Amino acid sequence: MSGRCVECVSLRERMWDGDYRREMADQGFLMEVCVDSVESAVNAERGGAGRIELCGSLLEGGITPSFGLLQVIKQYVQIPVYVMIRPRGGDFLYSDREVEVMKADIRLAKIHNADGLVFGALTEDGRIDSELCMDLLALSRPLPVTFHRAFDMVYDPMLAMETLISLGFERVLTSGCDSSALEGLPLIKRLVEQAKGRIIVMPGGGITERNLQRILEGAGVQEFHCSARSTKDSTMKYRNNSVSMGATISTSEYSIKVTDVTKVRTLNAMAKNLL
């Protein structure tokens, strides 16, 4: 086994015995960066992120990534990688066949050494799908699991959080059921107060260097989630601008969104000074 692989195994062992979490607590915060490429993952770690949320298609809010992507990223970064389990974009009410896909993806994520998982599911009336989540959590063990921003679509956020606590989720990612974490700050603060340390409440959604201080100080949290991306121009010389590969024409095929090392470092430094 290579030295790098030994280090990766050592990191996972430290996570399970709690040393890793205590180290992050000593720093006072943990910044999670959502990424959908190897370049973004490497940039997130270089900038000082404490954890990666790995997704496919961030333009859809994130879906399950390819396991080839997970495998390669694990070769290049040493910080924990939590894998999104979401079979499609859109709502969070899943059919039986979609649940089969989610379960298969959880098994594959574990085989490919994911450090944690990120998923969520709702009932048609906007409540946590406790039965499905219980099944998925059982299949996920021993990996820690974050309930993603499906939480922001629930009918009763306070009741929903109690459900997540009883199910055993490690954390909940939320914008406070609003368009951004800044807009949802009052609810995020209420959730933190109600949680009383029983679950980690992690704000996410539109967090930038312009609003990070207000969010962290206003919510009283020790973790936050961001993308910290910039747009870089394609190196293609020949360009056919009349063709779009996706359903939307709002983004060019010749511009790529990538995690920005400078933005991550800036947010990292701000959080260190605040918490």
Image (spheres, rainbow, N blue to C red):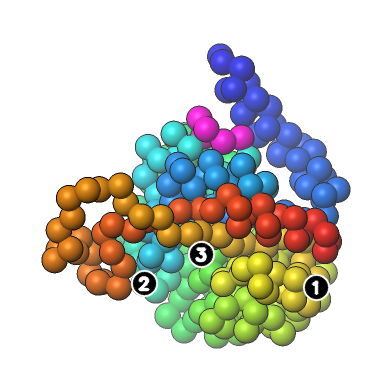
Left or right, 201 with reference to 232: right
Q: Residue at x 52, y 32 (%)?
A: 76
- Few, some or many C-alpha atoms within 10 Å of disc 1 (few <14, some 14-19, many ≥20)? some
Marks 3 and 1 sit apart, C-alpha to C-alpha, by 27 Å
Is residue 76 located in the magenta-colored stretch of the structure? yes
Q: Is there CB contact under 8 Å for labels 3 and 1?
A: no
Q: Is there CB contact under 8 Å for labels 3 and 2?
A: no
Left or right, 54 with reference to 19: left
- Earlier sequence position, callout 3 versus callout 1: 3
- Few, some or many C-alpha atoms within 10 Å of disc 3 (few <14, some 14-19, many ≥20)? many
Q: Which residue is mark 3?
A: 120
Please state the extent of the stretch shown in magenta in the rendering: 74-78
Is residue 120 located in the magenta-colored stretch of the structure? no
Find residue 270 and name its label.
Answer: none
Find residue 217 and name its label.
Answer: 1
Q: Residue at x 56, y 15 (%)?
A: 2
Q: Quadrant of the N terminus?
A: top right
- Identify the image quadrant of residue 222: bottom right
Marks 3 and 2 sit apart, C-alpha to C-alpha, by 13 Å
- Earlier sequence position, callout 1 versus callout 2: 2
Q: Is there CB contact under 8 Å for labels 1 and 2?
A: no
Q: Secondary structure at mark 1?
A: helix
Q: Residue at x 75, y 55 (%)?
A: 269
Residue type, label 2: Gly
Is 261 in front, or is 194? 261
